Image: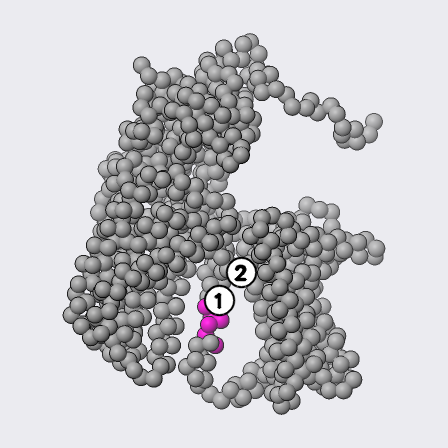
Amino acid sequence: MAGLAGMTWLFVRLKLSLVRGGLRGDAGRQAGFAFSMVAALLAGLAGFALVSLIRFAPPDIALDLVAVAFAIFAVGWVVVPLTAFGLDETLDPARLALFPLTTRQLATGMLAASATGPWPIASLVALSGGVVALAHGPGGVLLGVPAVVLVFAFCLTASRLVTTGLSGLLRTRRGRDLLAVAAIFVVLLAQVPNLLVNRGLPGDPTRMLASVGEVLRWTPPGLAAHAIADGGLIGVAELIVVAMSVVVLGWLWIAALRHALVRPDASSQGGGSVRRSGRISIGRFLPGGMLGAVVAKELKYAAREPRGRVNWIMALFITVIITLSLRGGDGAAGPGSVIGPACLAAVMIGLQAGNSFGIDGRSLWMNAVAFSTPRDLRTDLAGRHLAMAVIGVPLLVVVSLFAGLVTGHAALALAAAPVAWGVLGVAMGVGAITSVTAPYTYPDRLNAFTGAAPGQGGQAFAASFATMVVTGVLILPIVLPVVFGLTWWAVLAVPYGVAASWAGRRIAAGVGFARLPELLAAVSRPT
Amino acid sequence: MADAVRTQGLFKRFGQQVAVGGVDLVVPRGSFAGLVGPNGAGKTTTLGMVTGLLRPDGGRIEIDGRDVWADPVSVKARIGVLPEGLRLFERLSGRELLTYCGQLRGIPIDEVGRRADELLKVMDLAEAQDKLVVDYSTGMRKKIGLAAALLHNPGVLFLDEPFEGVDPVSANTLTEVLRRYVASGSTVVFSSHVMDLVERLCDWVSVMNRGFVVAQGPLDDVRQGRTLNEAFLDLVGVRGNGEEGLSWLGSPA
């Protein structure tokens, strides 16, 4: 099997040179590479220390904790490559389809390649903390080492199986759209335990742990943890079961791989179509001409473009989390506890207007060839703001009511909603100006970890930060009096917001039209 | 009568690299003009600057005698553009895309609908008109892009590589539409690598190489009795004749 070993080594070297590739390129990339290396090292050591510390817990709790830790690693291995799919070219079997490789060569090679690199090594180090945590006596250590290796192999094969199984889906447009939204939910759901801990757990933590441990007991991670703790013949039997599960996963993966290599890419076959008649067309309620056209386009984008959907979901979710966390405080619920979340929601929604043209990206030329005066650009911005208001205004009413009901001051929602509308107006006005002064490209593929094209991360951060700070200052005159009890002041918020967005559009149109080619280039960078 | 397109000393650099080094492009009104040149000759950059999408570092551009950068109002109403790369508003259906472009140009909605119907029919896109553009094939995208560029009946049409990656059936549709359009007195300027196609369609040719126009004029003047391909290879200079190296390539005798 010299060929197999040679091919495996080739894959490992390929992965290593991909990792090393991070060292070339500009200073930013090198800094990123160094950072990721250091982060992997620290994460590995910290993970090892944390898992090892479980040793000081009572034995049955320690067993459950290690099982949970092993399971978290397995889930992490499945989820993370999915959200970052495409970052690592060795992951996509379709790229290797043309090379004369047997499935076995491909399978071992790709498995070895995915075990190579700073992050896999870091998780192997962290996993081996399980031996320290659970092993009692030489039997435990003897079984512990193969147990950790088996859990690691289990993570790898499970991760490979899922990515390969989904790689067909990931290559289709609809699949990617779906996954983009799903990935954000995974990131957001990770916040839920945090929230529960903040609010105080509903039940007894040890009992919860025990029930989780019970569930995990017969899964491969649970079996492996139990084998280390047992250290005897039962442990050996359990490890054999884990090994068999790895073999089954590997076999399933090879089958999926074989299938993925010959299945054609059917991404545009019979794709979705838009219903034109039947429903009442939104166009009927819109003003005609350019303004109506922009509003209609923006509303369609909010519904059809995954990034648009994700932005709205994020804005709402963050608001809900903050509202609920605020409620956990010690009952000092003044007007601020209703108005605060409503205004926060308005700012979160308004932040989307901070890079209005980013979502158009390289299609923006279609507008640029038609816009011949600053007035056209102003109409375009007005259409975008109007579309955002069409969704945002009712949404802010809901958020205000929600915050009012949660804090037990439902009447305050009457003041919170208009203030939030005003804040939205201010955020849009400020956003119009940052949209033309600091535009940046959104990446094509939605990624939970970065919001801009390579090299524009700083600009993206500066743009949203500037929008937030300037908005934060400009909304003080409408927010502060209301928070301090001058409730009727809320009446002034809406005209204030309308005026602010008008002024923002006016300035932005002048500035933006003069630098339309530069604007176009900034949002059309390759990603 | 002014030429449809006339540039003087058009210049553009990206960092250290000069992409367009002083182009004097001329296209008489009513011609079907081909802009040819090897990769990196500056065709796309030139078309970007002529259509107002890319700011030149120097030089003048006139379309129908009006300065593109000084008088965008009258120029932008007169030109239709299909840039390279074909990024369209992907999440609109083909029909919605045309409606959007028409409204952006200030055409009344009923008129937009009528024109869109005819364009979709001629382009053979009537069946796919309610599909999202993101699901279109390359040929369909070029056709919907051309339809969007024609919607406001421009006097001059600029197309960057309109036939690249297009199947023969779609290509035939595209050429028929363009021929009819030129026959009515309008002007088409398109860039291409395919010499046969340029030779078959065009009556005016501009040859670019390394950021300059190296030959320009009526088709017959440029090719001077040769095929356009031969004339082109002479003009740009053949780089390597494929004789050196590669001794191992080919079936053994």
Say which of B146 and A468 sits in front.
A468
Residue occupied by mark 1 = A187
Q: Residues within 10 Å of mark 2 (few under 14, many from 20)?
A: many
- A493 part of magenta stretch: no
**As drawn, is A448 to the left or to the right of A59?**
left
| Residue A22 visible in the displayed image | yes
| Disc 2 secondary structure class | helix
Please state which amino acid type lies under the numbered disc 1. Val
The colour scheme used to paint the residues is one colour
Please state which amino acid type lies under the numbered disc 2. Thr
Residue A87 spot, x, y in % from top left: 58, 54
Residue A224 spot, x, y in % from top left: 68, 78
Q: Residue A176 carries which label?
A: none
Residue shown at 58% from the left, 68% from the top: A76
Image marks 2 and 1: residues in contact by CB distance under 8 Å: yes
Residue A337 spot, x, y in % from top left: 29, 75
Tell me: residue A217, above or below residue A158: below
Residue A27 spot, x, y in % from top left: 58, 51
Tell me how far mark 2 sits from mark 1, CA to CA. 10 Å
**As drawn, is B211 to the left or to the right of A417?**
right
Residue shown at 23% from the left, 37% from the top: B108
Say which of B35 and A345 sits in front.
A345
Q: Give the range drawn in magenta.
A: A187-193
- The chain letter under disc 2 is A
**As drawn, is A145 to the left or to the right of A76?**
right
